[in-house]
Amino acid sequence: MSKLKGKVALVTGASKGIGAAIAKSLAAEGAAVVVNYASSKSGADATVADIVAAGGKAIAVRGDVSKAGDAQALVDATIKQFGRLDILVNNSGVYAFAPIESVTEEDFHRQFNVNVLGLLLTTKAAGPSSLGSRLLEARSTQPRRVRSMQSPACCRVSSARARFASTR
């Protein structure tokens, strides 16, 4: 439990599935973790409880990554609670399997806004060009690096997941 000791991670979409597993894994390596959720508070609370029970530090923060204000609030809450942000995992994603004929504009925009715009907004909120670039915190003159990554699931494409993956 030392690879990430002293580091702070924000994991979007961490109330279940891959996001929860990523949050737990980061915490197991020593990082303090912000578990983001959009709708499943109980899932986020369970992920936090698992991390704390294993001796880690974590909090749950609600936020819709497809909204700039929420994305900024996630980063602000992370820095307020833990004093810094070192790792950003853009894991939030939504999808629906349906025949193309039944896909509405609303369906498309919901998926695009969470899966693509959400990644942009949370990365932007973390700092200018935060994909590995040096950043300065408002309260500090010390540069920091924020690593932004997407869940590996976004890279798998099969015929059933092609539309979801195309928005990631």
Image (tube, grey):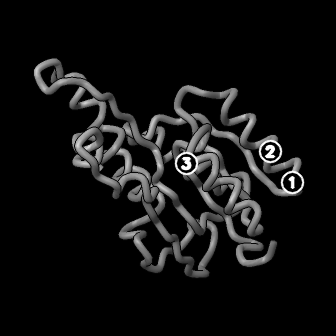
| Category of crowding for the residue at label 2, using alpha-carbon neighbours closer than 10 angstroms: few (below 14), some (14–19), many (at least 20) | some
Look at mark 2 in the image and give the residue it sits on.
50
| Residue situated in front as seen by the camera: 57 or 152 | 152
Dividing the picture into quadrants, the one containing residue 60 is top right
Q: Disc 3 or 2, which lies upstream in sequence?
A: 3
Tags 2 and 1 in contact by the CB under 8 Å rule? yes
**Residue found at the far front of this picture:** 159
Question: Is 120 left, or right, of 122 in this rendering?
Answer: left
How many other residues sit within 10 Å of disc 3, few (<14), some (14-19) or many (≥20)? some
Q: Position of residue 107 (x, y in %)?
A: 25, 25
Residue identified by numbered label 1: 54
Contact? badges 3 and 2 (CB < 8 Å): no
How far apart, in angstroms, are the residues tagged by discs 2 and 1?
6 Å
Packing grade of label 1 (10 A; few <14, some 14-19, many >=20) is few
SS of the residue under disc 1: loop
| As drawn, 16 above or below 12 | above
Question: Quarter-wise, where is residue 118 in the image?
Answer: top left
Residue type indicated by callout 3: Ile
